[in-house]
Image (cartoon, rainbow, N blue to C red):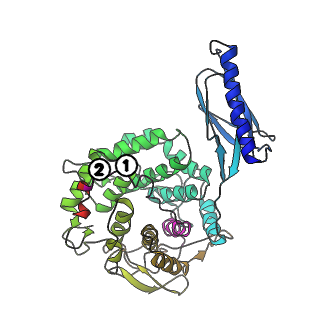
Amino acid sequence: MKENIISFFILNIFLLGCSSDNNSSEVDETFTVSGKVVDSDGSGLANISLTIGNQTVYSSASGEWSVSNLKDSVKITPMADGYTFTPASATASSTLTVTFVAEKTAIDLSAEAENIVAWFENVQYSNGLLPSTESSSTMSLYDNALAALVFTATGKYSKAESIFNFFNQRIGSELTTNGGFYQFRSTDGTTSGDRWLGDNAWLLIALNNYMAKVETTKYDKLKSTLEIWIRSLQDKDGGLWGGITASNSTISKNTEGMIDAYCAVQGYDDFHKKLLAHLKENRYNSTDGLLVSWPGNYYEYALDNHSWGYCTFEDFPKTVLEKTTMYANTQRATANGALITGFAPDIDKDIVWLEGTGQMVVAYQKAADSYKSTTYLAEMRKLLISSTLYPNSVGLPYASNLGTTYGSSQLWKGADTNICISSSAWYLFGLLNFDPMAVGYSRGTPDVDKFWKD
């Protein structure tokens, strides 16, 4: 039945187009586009958003829609959470009638995953952004990029768009004026912190994932402007500065941010080639076969360089995932007293870093190591806690207990007891077998530039 409906409406578009060509030798001064949105049984669907040029309309109770007085060629794109459409879009430069057939997106979330996503939905503010932790007034750029990825991975595209819209409206006031979006802002919009390369790169990674699923040009400027700024941070030695401080000085180069940028800027050109050359010369221990986080320092290595490096660089050796025992440890969780085994961010091994453990789960899945990915997901599950504000909403705290982050900096109060975005997002990615760094992974990097294969 569904195939017949789709074939009929595609034929309908073709015949109407031919009829228009036969009856008029020139395009009308203005024209109308109209049609209907139906399900696979042919029943009309209400309140489906359709972007038509720079306008947005919604289908009526019977699924019908129409826009008149158009003068220029327009692209018509339907969009709704939980649906894909056939055709995905249509283009009109003269009167056109088109019917879009909607099919429910096949995303079958477990009850556990649904309750995690519910937490993300519940804490999202009307401006589109989410606080980094429950009951917090701080909104992090990186955390909101992760939230956009959560909504994209679960087909809740309008929720992701609310986040992108916030930053889309601030391209001129922040991104191009100052260079980069700020690391933090309060719920009232007040910005603070530095403008980090890595955080901005993750917003671009989120956009790449969204645009791989949703056909739209709405965020083209945001995407291109982020990429331009990231490229502008490249030094003559090929490395990337870590961003710009609040006092407008340059942040020193850091390996994690350079991995993020390599992943975010799609394709392969001189930018990527020079960056790999820099990493080879300055951030790679060929003896250990590991990316170096802090050269010449006690904290030489960091966990996320293992997982993100493996997920970003083509043909990166699986041995980098095997060399993470230096971070493995077991702690008793503050929130519920459970013993949990996972990974610390560095060799101090004084916490189980739940975000980083989730990153390792995603890397193990990419490496087809189902035993380890399943094992560490089960460990993380021990620390799922219920929201204190919203029913049927759960998530994970940042860490098992209070201790230190990478280096000797102390964690904040509540890092071990309050639900946070980063750990909850990476745990959910593991549940969904979703790798946010997979889009654009196969970029045709020449073997001669893959220093890890030397």
> What's the residue at 24%, 53% (across, down)?
239
Residue 324, image quadrant: bottom left
Q: Which residue is mark 1?
A: 265
Along the polypeptide, which appears first: circle 1 or circle 2?
Answer: 1
Task: Decide: is 36 above or below 280.
Answer: above
Q: In the image, is 394 to the left or to the right of 311?
A: right
Q: Is residue 435 magenta?
A: yes
Q: Nearer the viewer, residue 182 or 379?
A: 379
Q: Are the two marked residues, 1 and 2, in contact with CB atoms closer than 8 angstroms?
A: yes
Q: In the image, is 95 to the left or to the right of 207?
A: right
Q: Is the residue marked by circle 2 packed among few (<14), some (14-19), or many (20+) residues within 10 Å?
A: many
Q: Nearer the viewer, residue 210 or 172?
A: 210
Q: Nearer the viewer, residue 277 or 184?
A: 277
Query: Mark 2 is on which residue type?
Result: His
Q: Is residue 47 visible?
A: no
Residue 8, disc: none
> What's the residue at 53%, 65% (across, down)?
136
Query: Mark 1 is on which residue type?
Result: Val
Q: Position of residue 254 (x, y in %)?
A: 28, 60
Which contiguous range is marked in magenta?
418-447
Secondary structure beneath label 2: helix
> What's the residue at 37%, 51% (across, down)?
443
Q: Which residue is mark 2?
A: 272
Marks 1 and 2 sit apart, C-alpha to C-alpha, by 8 Å
Q: Position of residue 301 (x, y in %)?
A: 28, 72
Q: Is residue 30 magenta?
A: no
